[in-house]
Image (tube, helix red, strand yellow):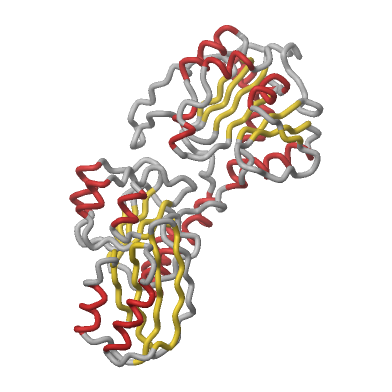
Amino acid sequence: MRALLLEAIHDDAAFALRDAGFEVERLDRAVGEDELVERLGGVHVLGLRSNTHLTARALDAATDLLAVGAFCIGTNQIDLATASDKGVAVFNAPFSNTRSVVELALSELIALTRRLTDKNRDMHAGVWDKSAVGSHEVRGRRLGIVGYGNIGSQLSVLAEALGMRVMFFDTADRLALGNARRCGTLDELLAECDVVTLHVDGRSSNSGIFGEEQFARMRQGSIFLNLSRGFVVDHEALARHVESGHIAGAAVDVFPVEPKAKGEEFVSPLRGLPNVILTPHVGGSTEEAQQDIGHFVAGKLRDYVATGATSLSVNLPPVALPRELGLARLLHLHVNTPGVLASVNGVLAEHGVNIEGQQLSTRGSLGFVVTDIAGTPSEDMVAALSSMPETVRLRVLS
């Protein structure tokens, strides 16, 4: 089995895969589509982060690919529909870097509220300006969180511990933690909060949700943060409101277009603006988070290849049947239509095979049945299962 790990994924991921018997190739950068197509031949497991895009064309070329690991939270860089059609499992790390992102958001909102960026700039320029003008405590200020998932809700708890009054808006029905108050609309949140921070996911419907209209509705002198996705914010509009003084400060960690490698020029209308913190997509980039992500995602990839376990897969139905020694395992991914399980079991019965264990799960248009049998599957039986019209992919583990 061969694994290809891109974008400087943590060493622990490579160690875990090598310990599981994989031959591991590593690159410390993102790759474009053409290079990815060339490299994916003979690769069974692919690891990437946010700057490598796994397109339909690349998946078409990856005829041996079994699973993809997104060593980050988001998976919008992966063509999930095509991956599902080809029976390629996709895993991510939905929880591993939550604390790191929350800590960065807290540090930035404090730095911006105290205008530490301006003080730091002046001191490096030799200017001593011991003034409290424009500098505030965060205690008592109103924090508005847009997106109350894993990151937003943890930020809510820690911000409240600092004495902030927390409000949030989410399109999903989320339970308010502590004394946080849910807003019925985004406009309500924008009108009342001193700090607005975005923690939404990467679904396409979130594209451009924060632009000129939303910035205009924010309070005079408020602070804005985005540590979620670059394409959700109109950066030209943000720059205009910072320059006018309507927005007193901003921190942005994600951008619509990001350099693929260290040394490439970063271009943004936000460069050079006062009291603006720009970071190169490092919200989850702490040693602790990257190590945990490496362990978690590599473990999911290893287990899927070895046993067919799909717990927490982004795109395949969840199945986790314990593996019994001495039994062969059939992994049958299929189109979710009535009667498939009966057809699979009918084929097994025709070939005199006894089922020792079995688990079926469905998700949308896909079904996944894992079956343990005694003995070695015959070539005829495997061919019969593979040729079923509903079959997407069949793997046999001995």
Can you give x and y, in whole percent of width and height, for residue 325 in the image? 42, 88
Q: From the viewer's perspective, is residue 393 above or below residue 33?
A: below
Q: In the drawing, does residue 39 fall left or right of residue 225?
A: left
Residue 186 lies in quadrant: top right
Q: Quadrant of residue 55?
A: top left
Instruction: State whether residue 115 is above or below residue 174.
Output: above
- On screen, 390 above or below 107? below
Residue 351: horizontal and vertical position, in percent?
Answer: 27, 89
Instruction: Say which residue appears at 57% left-offset and 52% top-offset.
Output: 95
Residue furthest front in the image: 338
Q: Which of the 4 image quarters holds residue 22? A: bottom left
* Residue under the image location 37 percent in, 71 percent down: 339
In screen coordinates, is 398 left or right of 73?
left
Quadrant location of the N terminus? bottom left
**Percent x, y of residue 226:** 55, 30
Q: Is residue 309 left or right of residue 165?
A: left
The C terminus is located in which quarter?
bottom left
Q: Nearer the viewer, residue 12 or 251?
A: 251
**Where does the image place residue 227, in percent across and percent down from the top left?**
54, 34
How many numbered discs? Answer: 0
